[in-house]
Image (cartoon, coloured by chain):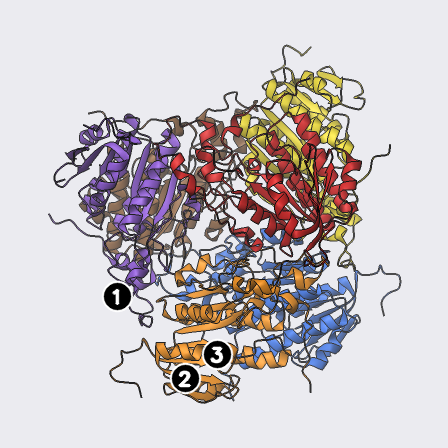
Chain colours: A yellow, B red, C orange, D blue, E purple, F brown
Amino acid sequence: MNNPSAPRKPFRRLLLTGAAGNLGRQLRAALAHWAETVRVTDIASLGQAAAHEEAVQANLADREAVHRLLQDVDAVVHLGGISVDAPFDDLLEANIRGTYNLYAAAHKHGVKRVVFASSNHAIGFHPVTEVLDADSPLRPDCLYGVTKCFGESLSRYYFDRFGIETVCLRIGSSFEEPKNPRMMVTYLSYRDFIELVRCSLFTNRVGHAIVYGASDNAVKWWDNTKASFLGFRPKDSSQQFAERFPPSAPTADRDDPAQRFQGGAFVIGEPMERAR
Amino acid sequence: MNNPSAPRKPFRRLLLTGAAGNLGRQLRAALAHWAETVRVTDIASLGQAAAHEEAVQANLADREAVHRLLQDVDAVVHLGGISVDAPFDDLLEANIRGTYNLYAAAHKHGVKRVVFASSNHAIGFHPVTEVLDADSPLRPDCLYGVTKCFGESLSRYYFDRFGIETVCLRIGSSFEEPKNPRMMVTYLSYRDFIELVRCSLFTNRVGHAIVYGASDNAVKWWDNTKASFLGFRPKDSSQQFAERFPPSAPTADRDDPAQRFQGGAFVIGEPMERAR
Amino acid sequence: MNNPSAPRKPFRRLLLTGAAGNLGRQLRAALAHWAETVRVTDIASLGQAAAHEEAVQANLADREAVHRLLQDVDAVVHLGGISVDAPFDDLLEANIRGTYNLYAAAHKHGVKRVVFASSNHAIGFHPVTEVLDADSPLRPDCLYGVTKCFGESLSRYYFDRFGIETVCLRIGSSFEEPKNPRMMVTYLSYRDFIELVRCSLFTNRVGHAIVYGASDNAVKWWDNTKASFLGFRPKDSSQQFAERFPPSAPTADRDDPAQRFQGGAFVIGEPMERAR
Amino acid sequence: MNNPSAPRKPFRRLLLTGAAGNLGRQLRAALAHWAETVRVTDIASLGQAAAHEEAVQANLADREAVHRLLQDVDAVVHLGGISVDAPFDDLLEANIRGTYNLYAAAHKHGVKRVVFASSNHAIGFHPVTEVLDADSPLRPDCLYGVTKCFGESLSRYYFDRFGIETVCLRIGSSFEEPKNPRMMVTYLSYRDFIELVRCSLFTNRVGHAIVYGASDNAVKWWDNTKASFLGFRPKDSSQQFAERFPPSAPTADRDDPAQRFQGGAFVIGEPMERAR
Amino acid sequence: MNNPSAPRKPFRRLLLTGAAGNLGRQLRAALAHWAETVRVTDIASLGQAAAHEEAVQANLADREAVHRLLQDVDAVVHLGGISVDAPFDDLLEANIRGTYNLYAAAHKHGVKRVVFASSNHAIGFHPVTEVLDADSPLRPDCLYGVTKCFGESLSRYYFDRFGIETVCLRIGSSFEEPKNPRMMVTYLSYRDFIELVRCSLFTNRVGHAIVYGASDNAVKWWDNTKASFLGFRPKDSSQQFAERFPPSAPTADRDDPAQRFQGGAFVIGEPMERAR
Amino acid sequence: MNNPSAPRKPFRRLLLTGAAGNLGRQLRAALAHWAETVRVTDIASLGQAAAHEEAVQANLADREAVHRLLQDVDAVVHLGGISVDAPFDDLLEANIRGTYNLYAAAHKHGVKRVVFASSNHAIGFHPVTEVLDADSPLRPDCLYGVTKCFGESLSRYYFDRFGIETVCLRIGSSFEEPKNPRMMVTYLSYRDFIELVRCSLFTNRVGHAIVYGASDNAVKWWDNTKASFLGFRPKDSSQQFAERFPPSAPTADRDDPAQRFQGGAFVIGEPMERAR
């Protein structure tokens, strides 16, 4: 399948979960350079698989399916699950049971490296006037954020107990461009996101690492000094979009939680009920 | 039901989950002094209800049942769920879904104080040569411990978002007496356990607090200075049982994880599969 | 004046400011044991001077008067000034100009040790769920507290610049007995207060020290470990008054600042205007 | 007064105190871009007011005058007062009473943002071999520095009590160019000073922030990581003046305080008496 | 040799170096209870060996001799070497070469536990107004102290590399009674010293631990919280000798290093030359 | 000897030990610009002395020779001794006795500044997933590293006792270019090394400083923020050699200490015996 005259790629096979999502689509092209084979999976349709890809539509809550996904895999980039706030029952299946299935299968199949898409919503209840680092306490700002805390704790256990290394990416706002003033702070360009995944996969030893995913924006809420062993240096900045958000006097409502906390509007969401 | 001439008790109604378990049984008598009515619940049979008790057998994974439990309640002592390692599917229902149901119902019914039985297994992968405090990072030593980390994160969210205060009790080993040398360190006498719950219920403001549950034993792995606003001062010590564990030379196997880590034998357990 | 056959007392002359106040009166007897002569001063009437006392009524805002007070003095216990919230103009004279005068005169007259009555109101805007130590940041809860912060900064300068040592006593509530539930935490018995002053005067080197003044009460907001070089060990506890404040369920108003912050009702005071 | 076709400026009216001083003059031009109207004030003559300016000569120690200054103002840049060491009585009026008047008036008139010119002399008794950040303890190096500590404590109180946000700028040496080797470290170019004020005014939430004012000089005594939520990134460096201070062997006098401490020659000043 | 009917003692054979010194003599009796055989060694004469003792006069700088000492030993209490300041050449042989020989031999002979008599002089250049713990930086106050720092670093290496556990005892002043006011702070009663060694030998895992050796004296410079996993709780206090050092006003000489630093008079010693 | 018309150089005479070694050779040219006279010394042959040089072949273990070296010297760059792991007896002479001789002579001859080549092997037993700074605890990874810890402790003593300032350079890998993937992290270009020595010599006050010697490489294990008062800013990066170490999947052996710890292969060396 691979051109025999081409140089060997560093990984034999990588697994990408959540491959049909916004960030998953960004990564697919990059992964082609890093692995002979990329197994892409999502609960949604994955579109046309490239020559180097194995596309497997699957539900992470399905234990057997997840065990099959982890077979013969060198490392995992785990973006799968729900990435917005949602009814708890849905989060439970996708983010709690799904992530457990992933680690249980990684253990069984001897996979030793996971890059886990955690989220800034695991720490969104810290005020915007505080600068966090890898040791800042968890402060989830929604049930979705709580499930990301679960993923961080679970992966810590699998590292301490079985030596499975994980880099937890507390991703800010990774979109084409910032959509509001808060995202001027949390913006992570696609290029920087890909670079962050690259560092997380290729650094020889990562242990169980916590790193914040933001570009080199002017305002910073997060300090990655303690993760500098990963070698991640963002190249982009939200400053290129500065003119879209002209300077304005501070907002009048002192007590608006959506202005006071890093999680923004998430912190005023209500836990959702699932329609039945 | 209550003697009209007796002085009023501080709480109108307390809810005790896990009331049929080892620690639940210890608490039932004490709660009688603190509340006019004690609603006791468990998945197992609760035996004969006392005059001041409302006994309700219920499964915490049953959302409707839990909502009924939280009605007209001033505060909750939440000991329910599974308190040993178990298959993940079981832990998911009892400790994750169950604890979520409890907080969702507390929010709905305006309950503002929870005393949550977390566990030393939320931090059991710290070495026995380290002294922890409330800011020590989570290091669960088994899947059960991971679900206790979930409970701590979830309760933090309900505090930051809705002002529901929780004291997370990282209980050591609360039994009649220490059963092995490790428990000489982790022992929490029943009397001290009850006192710890008392402090957690009556302190006027607790925010979201982390406190370790151990008696005043000679060897200490945990330092409660940061929780001294709770006023908890243990009165017992495992030293009264010292003669059962005569001094011995350090064990020969340097690398035995069960000797190296605070969680003891838990740290070498394997995740369990549920029999089908 | 002193009995020639009596053993010499350690200090030749001590100055006590604020000697007519509540705490000043407690100290007068004790100081008799420590110094041949005790110069007592206050803006109010000092009553009958004892044989070993020099009583000087004076206003600390009066520079010349203060310079006279500091002559031939070995050390100062500075309780003078206003010890409740008050109009800023009054605080400015008594606590800011007065304390400056005191240190300027101490410098001029070669006095090298001051025991300064700071206050818990210098840190009263910390929440009741936090345990403070000598390095906790200043959080004054009223203008009075702000002037105590001034005294702490000023004395730090005189230490760094001129080697005048000061122990800043962040006194809790030093009264005959606790008057409300908050004082069960902040209570400093008169006996413990005197012992704290004794340690502050006799410890050979104190540098510029911060120490909290509370008895060995059950609930603790303040940790004096960093000041353990002073040797202060309280002997009393507010527990002896526990029956006056029977246990009660936490108060309903979650957001009441007087319940949430260590300063209690001070934190909701309004800056006062001086009647004209 | 304003060109109706020009875009609206973010602030309606800003107040600049100390507008006739060295730094005040630098700011006047910049403020024109940020506010429709700039009220400039100083105890000294303000020269010709520009079209967008309201010039008010006033003494900050005059309470009524200060209350008039704060009327209808969105935010304040408070550079006023004495900015060198001076007799205490003068500092008391200008920096203590003056700053109190400013905050009392801000509270009364609903002003919610102050940019306060604190000073490196609030921390100048730290040695030159220590790198400070926002949590470093106060170490004033002169009475002037003590009054800046007062301003920091006072503004903290007004933030905790009334939600008035302040950015305390611990300004290094903001002049046309460095005048001595110490200023190679403490230099803050005028351009970087203006940028620092801009960040302090426009960041939506600042709480009560401490930030050091230095350009991107080679040698750094101050680390602004904890204030990175302000987005301040200096663009200049004292290195452009390096050739004026050719390398020299360390000075011989090991114990010279002016060489050992960050405050430089300030630390050996004597408290001044006011001529009478 | 041992009474066959007596219960077995926990250790088969312990090695005690420095057994003829002040503290070594205190320990000999205690060790009889803990080990079947105690090998005692010193460069000086050891007197009469008890029935359970093997007495070996030896120089720790003699590699072959040290290797013989370590044969068939379960654990070592290493008090040997020079315990006062001395010419560097002497310290080099006794404390540097001697301690290296001990660890090299321990490694070769599979000994896995050492109790190492470090000293407060490894940290004596900290001021008396600072409270230290196990993480405080090294500040030796004399060449002797520097060699104790060497022993701590060397033992750390042998732990990280070969798993040889060491408890470094930073012993204060262990004598019959305090000889001067400084020793009121640093006093370690013989009984508490023996208890400290007992905890260091019997705690199942100690890793590489730092613990301060002082009784429960009123004034404390050292906080052993981080070593509370050893279970050391002193039972004595220097307070029983308080009347010998009556209270006195602070000494006049502000700058006397022997008063300012924890090491006392050691800090003003000069490095010694060895007589030739 | 020096051109009378040339500008005076900042130092009169510098001493460079280890001048014949790899790094010593790099420095000789640079020192010519900084001092009128450079005294170069080594145990090995020094080659041809330049016009401004005094070449003295000497053994640092020879006390008399070292005292002669320190005469009439302004400052020392101490690179001498053994810079790889070696038998302890050799390290003892070269690095322990040699460094002691150097400081004893510096004290006797009034030399007040030493730049000391410590090593990353003083902290090499920290894992590669941790970022260290100047306060990280010592973790030597070999006997050579232990002797560097000795040099750091010894120089701290000479600073606290006699005011001799030292900058301890924890040099990474200073070679022409990185020789293996680990050196991509630890690489210090010769140019950056020289700059680091320059900052250490010319900064007016350095106290006793710890600074890591690495270029501005992508991956960082060491954070020099606390030493930013030295003004060291590396200009090079190992990234220019990145193509030599193409990306590869993490190595399979999880437990290989040479991969897990910063010291690399040093951490698995065995203490060496000296051939006889």
Residue E113: in sight, yes or no? yes
Res F147 quadrant in image: top left
* The one of E59 and B26 positioned closer to us in this rendering: B26
Chain of the residue under the numbered disc 2 shown in the image: C
Residue pointed to by mark 1 = E244
Res A203 quadrant in image: top right
Question: Identity of the amino acid at label 1?
Answer: Arg
Residue pointed to by mark 3 = C24
* The one of C206 and B254 positioned closer to us in this rendering: B254
- Where is residue A264 shown, x and y percent of the image? 75, 47
Q: Which mark is residue D207?
A: none
Q: Residue C39 carries which label?
A: 2
- A257 versus C176 height, above or below: above
- Where is residue E4 shown, x and y percent of the image? 23, 26
Secondary structure of residue under mark 2: strand
Question: Identity of the amino acid at label 3?
Answer: Gly
Question: Identity of the amino acid at label 2?
Answer: Arg
Residue F177: in sight, yes or no? no
Q: Nearer the viewer, mark 2 or mark 1?
A: 1
- Where is residue C10 shown, x and y percent of the image? 32, 75
- C131 versus A45 height, above or below: below
